[in-house]
Image: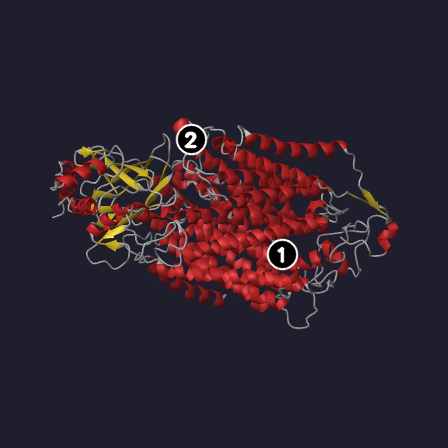
């Protein structure tokens, strides 16, 4: 009995350490182990509880296994026959009842959380409503109350509840921002899925598509940008303003005839593919070419370089996407990339 | 020719083993290509399309064309022997089951060599990605028709084992005296009986969508994509238990034999097996927590899923207590069995974690899930199969596998396995989704993916070492003893290795659980026969199972290309399909009208040990 207590005493700090280690793991803008919002926090709480129970179970079973393997090895030349035990009702009941108790400890908060996280906030006047529509391989974000539509970057006011209506334009995708909330599928057909989350801290959080949706499934990233209320209002207003065309008339003509057929800027252009208004101030091009003036990795480059690379051959960046190679002269390509990289929305202070 | 016409369960077992082993290598190669693609960020070793073909074919191959046939190999080789039967209930159907599996598998893999490539919508083939609008080309047609044909084989195999186990047990072998592996095979067969029709229906509906422009799963025309998820998982979840239960059976046999102890808590083991099989059907929607079924469904399926941990826990502790107080011998077979226990426990606890729906919103479709089900399927099922193969190899082939090489193989494979998959739990929690062709640099995934790839290569080396062992062993003389492990407990160890064609010269009389062990403990040399030596009736070999399956194979091709071959002449594809069906139904007709009485082995022939399988 003494031994067993010592065993648990040694185990307790190990478990505590494990939970500590887990709670500060991975990039803060990406990891489910490093939650940045209340929804992810609640999910993480459940994960921690499950982790602790399961580590306990694993350690005990491993210890028993190890003990048995070492203690009851067959010695060389041992011909003796061990006692043929039928079983033990007492023991068998113990290892039926203990798991049931553990499952109740885990099951009750699970059910509570299921219902907590399925609350419908869509009628909450303070909440920001967003209709998320997934496409092969990009994301469209529509704010029905504000009458604006954007792509690839979901800008939200910090601290406010964001309610999501998730739809798809083609196949199944799944909307997932690990550090803010778990995922929800976007189902084809009439059924719209709802979820909510909020980000109390300002910052950019990485989002991903989690459901196999074709060749570029793994490259279907997006960003959630949490900003303060005033910036959000400035952003929403700026997004509705008309946008100047490229100053060079030749570039402007090419842009209008070749890009605006599908894409929109300001009040011009078509709604088929991502809205380009303010693309110059987004964090990335196509969700995966990260805009930075100080590139460290091969998927990073200046906004201009990234746009240039994308427009030159989109299929090279995201295989199977529907944009395809656009017939542009070198001059048009350079000009359009330059124009788009300067198409910014100065909404942050 | 002998192998094409055989209806002997032992030979069919070997056929299953060879075919399953081959596809295990194919699936393993696909896995290695996947891991090479992921060893560094932004790698372009394979294209995005090829990558999706690889993941789809890896999953499909490993589940349907490697794991299932290898289990059927063990079941065929062992179950009739364990229950004291001379063959399965329907030897002809048994052969048919193998050949439909084989031709279905070949059909599926032919897709690699076609211009439109292999299926690429994932092994779960979620609609509408798998439908005609988003999977153009013939990849998914191969998936639909290949699996349909292979599925027929599994279904009739399952029915065959149900009938065999219910009807053909030796006198005295009551249900509660049946060896654990037979029990597991029995429950597995029952699961097959109920689960595979769901798959057949789903595949048929998808085939109608693809070949005949139906709209079962097309939401734009009134179909429902979520319907596919339900149909697939109503089959797919029990499938997991179809796979793992026989492995449980193997582990029970091996641990008990090499601990020289009877299985601890036999009746609770049986009860747990039945309960797992039953619950397996109740939990399919835990694959669909993020589909948006609502909180009530999510809560119910969460709790139902967690409940499976209870019977599984009973099994784990019973195994540990079988070893407790025993005299444990670490043969290669037992290394795999003992290694199975902690590995499977880890797969099990992550399963319970996944069952908590709100947490699953984070785990779902990430590498955490990849790690979880590889712990269950590789760490559970494949270790179980390796254990069973080492254990029954002498009975199947009359030769004992090389023990030293076997142990080296175990350590190589086992360490490689944990290296590959343990780290993937963390990759998933840190935000890496599954089924991604590549990942960006700077996300913190690089080192872990590299480690995972190194582990996968070790598993590959381990697998090659096993095949090397098979080749080396095969070159040695066939001299294994009847009871090569000396502690054999069940009926298969009472007859020669490999057994004669008729298995038992005289059907044995079973006087208790662990029948052979009981006789040994009572001081007897062998089993008491339940009948006098007499003439034994045997079924005749037949080529018809082969031709029936070949006909289905041709039909599959015809259906798939019904629209492409119009340049030859209109509807040629349907003519080809018709020709295939004609061969199949013609063979069935022949089988019906030709009265085959089989043949007899007379007592004189039984005397000299001449009649070998």
> Which residue is under mark 1?
B388
Q: Position of residue A278 (x, y in %)?
A: 18, 43
Q: Position of residue B428 (x, y in %)?
A: 38, 53
Is B522 on the left-hand or right-hand side of B228? right
Q: Position of residue B418 (x, y in %)?
A: 47, 60
Is B544 on the left-hand or right-hand side of B445? right
Compared with B423, B246 (above or below) is: above
Q: Nearer the viewer, residue A272 or A118?
A: A272
Q: Cβ–Cβ below 8 Å for labels 2 and 1? A: no
Q: Residues within 10 Å of mark 2 (few under 14, many from 20)?
A: many
Task: Name the element at disc 1.
Answer: helix
Q: Position of residue A332 (x, y in %)?
A: 19, 44
**What's the mark number on residue A264?**
none
Q: Nearer the viewer, mark 2 or mark 1?
A: 2
Of pointers 2 and 1, the one earlier in the residue sequence: 2
Q: Residues within 10 Å of mark 1 (few under 14, many from 20)?
A: many
Residue sitting at x 59%, y 33%: B576
In this picture the colour scheme is secondary structure
The chain that hosts pointer 1 is B
Is B95 on the left-hand or right-hand side of A344? right
The chain that hosts pointer 2 is B
Q: Residue furthest front?
A: B568
- Can residue B197 be seen in the rendering of this structure? no
Task: Name the element at disc 2.
Answer: loop
Q: Nearer the viewer, residue A142 or A158?
A: A142
> Which residue is under mark 2?
B218
Q: Rounded to the nearest whole Å, what is the CA distance between mark 2 and mark 1? A: 44 Å
Q: Nearer the viewer, residue B119 or B260?
A: B119
- Can residue B189 be seen in the rendering of this structure? yes
Q: Nearer the viewer, residue B595 or B85?
A: B595
């Amino acid at each position: 009995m003494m031994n067993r207590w010592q065993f648990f005493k040694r185990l307790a700090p190990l478990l505590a350490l494990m939970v500590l280690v887990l709670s500060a793991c991975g990039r803060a803008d990406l990891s489910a182990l490093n939650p940045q919002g209340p929804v992810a926090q609640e999910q993480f709480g459940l994960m921690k509880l499950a982790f602790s129970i399961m580590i306990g179970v694993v350690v005990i079973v491993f210890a028993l296994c190890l003990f048995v393997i070492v203690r009851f090895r067959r010695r060389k030349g041992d011909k003796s026959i061990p006692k043929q035990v039928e079983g033990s009702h007492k023991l068998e009941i113990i290892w039926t009842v203990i798991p049931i108790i553990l499952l109740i400890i885990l099951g009750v908060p699970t059910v509570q959380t299921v219902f907590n996280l399925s609350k419908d906030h869509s009628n909450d006047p303070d909440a920001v409503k967003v209709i998320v529509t997934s496409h092969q391989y990009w994301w469209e974000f529509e704010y029905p109350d504000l009458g604006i539509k954007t792509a690839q970057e979901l800008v939200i006011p910090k601290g406010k509840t964001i309610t999501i209506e998730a739809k798809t334009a083609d196949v199944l995708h799944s909307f997932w921002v690990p550090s803010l909330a778990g995922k929800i599928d976007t189902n084809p057909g009439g059924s719209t899925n709802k979820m909510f989350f909020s980000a109390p801290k300002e910052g950019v959080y990485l989002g991903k598509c989690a459901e196999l949706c074709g060749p570029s499934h793994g490259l279907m990233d997006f960003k959630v940008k949490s900003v303060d209320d005033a910036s959000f209002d400035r952003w929403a207003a700026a997004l509705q303003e008309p946008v100047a065309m490229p100053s060079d008339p030749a570039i402007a003509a090419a842009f209008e005839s070749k890009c605006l057929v599908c894409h929109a800027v300001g009040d011009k252009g078509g709604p088929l593919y991502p809205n380009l208004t303010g693309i110059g101030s987004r964090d990335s091009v196509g969700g995966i070419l990260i805009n930075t003036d100080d590139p460290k990795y091969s998927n990073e480059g200046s906004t201009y370089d990234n746009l240039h690379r994308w427009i030159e051959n989109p299929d090279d960046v995201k295989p199977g996407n529907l944009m395809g190679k656009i017939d542009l002269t070198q001059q048009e390509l350079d000009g359009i990339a330059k124009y788009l990289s300067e198409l910014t929305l100065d909404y942050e202070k | 020719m002998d192998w094409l016409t055989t209806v002997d369960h032992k030979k069919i077992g070997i056929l299953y083993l060879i075919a399953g082993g081959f596809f295990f290598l194919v699936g393993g190669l696909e896995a290695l290509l996947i891991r090479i693609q992921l060893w560094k960020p932004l790698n372009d070793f394979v294209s995005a399309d090829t990558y999706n073909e690889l993941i789809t074919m890896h999953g499909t191959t490993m589940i349907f064309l490697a794991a299932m046939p290898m289990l059927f190999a063990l079941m065929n080789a062992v179950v009739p022997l364990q229950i004291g039967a001379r063959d399965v209930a329907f030897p002809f159907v048994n052969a048919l089951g193998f050949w439909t599996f084989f031709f279905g598998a070949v059909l599926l893999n032919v897709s690699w060599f076609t211009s439109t490539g292999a299926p690429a919508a994932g092994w779960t083939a979620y609609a509408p990605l798998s439908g005609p609008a988003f999977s153009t080309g013939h990849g998914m047609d191969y998936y639909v028709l290949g699996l349909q044909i292979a599925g027929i084989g599994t279904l009739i195999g399952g029915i065959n084992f149900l009938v065999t186990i219910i009807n053909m047990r030796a006198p005295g072998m009551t249900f509660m005296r049946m060896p654990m592996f037979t029990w597991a095979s029995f429950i597995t067969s029952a699961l097959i009986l109920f689960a595979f029709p769901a798959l057949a229906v789903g595949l048929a509906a998808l085939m109608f969508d693809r070949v005949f422009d139906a709209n079962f799963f097309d939401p734009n025309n009134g179909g429902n994509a979520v319907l596919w998820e339900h149909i697939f998982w109503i089959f797919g979840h029990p499938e997991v238990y179809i796979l793992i239960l026989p492995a449980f059976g193997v582990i029970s046999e091996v641990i008990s034999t090499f601990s020289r102890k009877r299985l601890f808590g036999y009746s609770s083991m049986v009860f747990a097996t039945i309960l797992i099989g039953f619950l397996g059907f109740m939990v399919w929607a835990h694959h669909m927590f993020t589909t948006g079924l609502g909180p009530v469904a999510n809560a119910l399926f969460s709790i139902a899923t967690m409940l499976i941990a209870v019977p599984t826990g009973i099994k784990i502790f019973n195994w540990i207590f079988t070893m407790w107080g025993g005299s444990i011998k670490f043969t290669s077979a037992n290394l795999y069995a003992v290694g199975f226990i902690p590995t499977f426990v880890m797969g099990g606890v992550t399963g319970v974690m996944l069952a908590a729906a709100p947490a699953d919103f984070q785990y779902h479709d990430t590498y955490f899930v990849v790690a979880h089900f590889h712990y269950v399927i590789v760490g559970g099922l494949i270790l179980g199969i390796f254990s069973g193969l080492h254990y029954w190899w002498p009975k199947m082939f009359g030769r004992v596998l090389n023990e030293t090489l076997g142990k080296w193989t175990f350590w190589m494979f086992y360490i490689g396995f944990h290296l590959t998959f343990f780290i993937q739990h963390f990759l998933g929690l840190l935000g890496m989704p599954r089924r991604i062709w590549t990942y960006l640099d700077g996300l913190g995934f690089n080192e872990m993916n590299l480690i995972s790839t190194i582990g996968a290569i070790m598993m590959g080396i381990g697998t090659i070492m096993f095949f090397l062992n098979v080749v080396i062993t095969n070159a040695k003389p066939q001299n294994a003893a009847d009871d090569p492990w000396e502690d054999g407990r069940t009926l298969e160890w009472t007859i020669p290795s490999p057994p004669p064609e008729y298995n038992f010269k005289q059907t044995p009389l079973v006087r208790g659980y662990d029948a052979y062990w009981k006789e040994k403990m009572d001081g007897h040399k062998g089993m008491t026969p339940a009948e006098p030596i007499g003439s034994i009736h045997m079924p005749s070999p037949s080529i018809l199972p082969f031709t029936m399956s070949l006909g289905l194979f041709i039909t599959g091709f015809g259906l798939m290309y019904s629209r492409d071959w119009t340049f030859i002449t209109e509807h040629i594809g349907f003519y080809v399909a018709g020709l295939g069906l004609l061969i199949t139904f013609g063979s069935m007709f022949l089988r019906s009208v030709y009265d085959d009485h089989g043949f007899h082995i007379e007592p004189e022939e039984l005397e000299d040990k001449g009649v070998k399988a």
